[in-house]
Amino acid sequence: MIAALGRREFLSSLAATAAAAAMRPDAISAQDAKRPKLRLAFKYNMIKINGSVEDKLNLAKKLGMEGVEVDSPSTFNKDEVKAASKKTGIKIHGVIDSVHWRDTLSDLDEAVRAKGLAALRGAIEDAAFFECDTVLLVPGVVKDSVTYEQCYERSQAEIKKVLPLAGERKIKILIETVGNNFITKPEQMISFVNDLGSPWAGAYFDCSNMIRHGVSSAEWIRRLGKMMVKFDFKGFSKEKGRVPIGEGDEDWPEVLKALGEVGYDGWATSEVSGGGEAELADIAARMKRVLGVG
């Protein structure tokens, strides 16, 4: 009986050892799975070379980008841009409402808000045209004539008017963190998006803009979680202001760790002045270095 028991224990031990060995590759894979899966992109207006739209997208591709984000409204021919995107394989992953700083949804003047709302509608339609899934929006600006509360209430009211259209077109309106004296803490973003009450609203986090307000980029990401649909970045130093990518106060290893923790899988878009091929090559190299992309 004792011999039989010992034999069973021995076989059980062997089975456990084999199971542990079999689990090791899975454990490694699980660790690897925690790394964020990033797709690199430029803002389209960063590409400042002479040439066709196709030439510009081919340069982005050459430098390791998979996509671009475009302005709406813009001066380019939309059909030409869409065709070049299809031909080069560089995806237009999102649209930027390019008048949200001028015709703000928080303005005291109802006519200005109406112009801003029309632009937001146009951006949603452009996003549908380009077959992308998001519109980046600065919801308003807090200034002498507009309090935080007024900015909140007015922009909420205007955005809610277009959420049905966003749902029809399957386009998410993403609220960005910028230097507009509005939404400077993660809980404020969470409140703003939740109050919109729609699955077609989310957050677009700039990993650099909020450093000045004291909460780290990684902590923002952890608190926003799945509410953060996309992120962009530059370089920001509390002492110097804007700096080249990789020379700011961003803690990139911690940002990558946080992105992995929340299961981020998506676009990482640089937002700097750009330039010609030499400048863009430097920007692309910096992007890859801070994001740990080979």
Image (tube, helix red, strand yellow):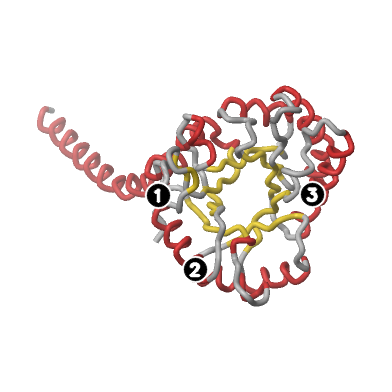
Left/right of residue 196 with respect to residue 288 in the rendered view: right
**Marks 3 and 2: which is nearer the front?**
2
Tag 2: amino acid:
Leu
Q: CA distance from mark 1 to mark 3?
A: 39 Å
**Mark 3, residue position:** 169
The reply to whether the C-beta atoms of the residues labelled 3 and 2 are less than 8 Å apart is no
Q: CA distance from mark 1 to mark 2?
A: 21 Å
The reply to whether the C-beta atoms of the residues labelled 1 and 3 are less than 8 Å apart is no
Q: Could you tell me which residue is drawn at 72 percent across and 24 percent down?
A: 147
Tag 3: amino acid:
Arg
Query: Which x, y percent locates residue 192?
Result: 68, 28
Q: Could you tell me which residue is drawn at 79 percent across and 42 percent down?
A: 103
Q: Check the image and name the residue furthest to the right.
A: 111
Task: Tell me the element at label 1.
Answer: loop
Which circle's residue, 3 or 2, is located before the other in the chain?
2
Left/right of residue 147 with respect to residue 110 in the rendered view: left
Given residues 72 and 243, the one toward you in this image is 243
Query: Which x, y percent locates residue 69?
Result: 64, 57
Given residues 176 and 23, the one toward you in this image is 176
